């Protein structure tokens, strides 16, 4: 009930009802003044704009937490897959970079969680790109035994992991740059406040 009393519909209807009371005092409404006031109240309530629904509160740290859990599952999956030596080394470097970005602490909670593009890039890499690279390698390796020649699947896997590593380094550099910009902005704010 209290929610309706504060609603736009009630406020607009009440304003129109007051106009109806003004018309009654002016003598325009006559003996039908209750119908005029009620009619104007109803008309005001009908033409009032609808209530704005607040957007649901999304917690970016929840997305980082879910991504962290998916990264752990990816590590378990890759622990069971036999990767060639160089690709294994590249995966170790890549997983170290992903792990550092997702490690609980201020980087993940304060920096990464506030940069949706970085979260999206990591999410795409962890949930789609790396598993797809490894799965394609496993399937292609079997076929390459039947048709020798051409580029080896190991070489493609190494290139793909190199590209993902370069992307992760770009994400890290962007996060570092965003943090530096935040610091500079805060410093400028404090300097401006000190001047006034």
Image (tube, rainbow, N blue to C red):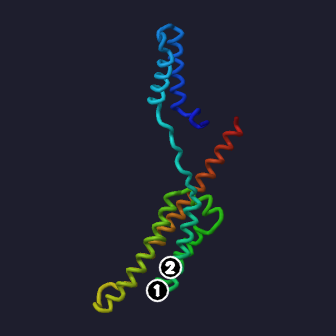
For the residues labelled 1 and 2, the Cα–Cα distance comes to 9 Å
For label 1, count other residues whose C-alpha is less than 10 Å away and answer few (under 14), some (14-19) or many (20+): some
Q: Position of residue 128 (x, y in %)?
A: 43, 71
Q: Residues within 10 Å of mark 2 (few under 14, many from 20)?
A: many
Front in this rendered view, residue 31 or 24: 31
Comes first in the chain, label 1 or label 2: 1
Where is residue 124, by image quadrant? bottom left
> In the visual, does 129 lie left or right of 107?
left
Determine whether label 1 and label 2 are within 8 Å by CB.
yes
Locate residue 89, reporting x and y percent. 51, 83
| Tag shown at residue 83 | 1
- Asked if 103 appears above or below 146 in the picture, the reply is above
The image shows residue 121 at horizontal and vertical percentages of 47, 64
Quadrant of the snapshot with the C terminus:
top right
Mark 2 highlights which residue?
A: 91
- Can you give x and y, in whole percent of width and height, for residue 62 in the image? 58, 61
Residue shown at the point (52%, 47%) measured from the top left: 55
Q: Say above or below: 158 vs 129.
A: below
């Amino acid at each position: 009930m209290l929610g309706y009393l504060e609603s736009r519909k009630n406020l607009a209807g009440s304003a129109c009802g007051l106009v109806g009371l003004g018309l009654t005092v002016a003598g325009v409404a006559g003996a039908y003044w209750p119908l005029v006031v009620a009619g104007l109240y109803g008309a005001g309530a009908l033409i009032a704009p609808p209530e704005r629904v607040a957007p649901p509160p999304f917690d970016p740290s929840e997305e980082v937490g879910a991504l962290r859990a998916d990264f752990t599952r990816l590590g378990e999956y890759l622990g069971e897959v036999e990767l060639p030596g160089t690709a294994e080394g590249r995966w170790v470097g890549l997983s170290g970079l992903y792990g550092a970005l997702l490690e609980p602490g201020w980087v993940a909670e304060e920096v990464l969680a506030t940069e949706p593009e970085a979260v999206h890039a990591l999410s795409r890499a962890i949930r789609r790109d790396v598993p797809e690279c490894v799965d394609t390698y496993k399937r292609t390796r079997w076929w390459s035994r039947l048709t020798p020649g051409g580029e080896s699947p190991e070489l493609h896997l190494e290139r793909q992991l190199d590209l993902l590593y370069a992307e992760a380094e770009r994400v890290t550099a962007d996060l570092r740059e965003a943090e530096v910009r935040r610091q500079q902005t805060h410093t400028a704010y404090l300097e401006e406040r000190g001047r006034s």
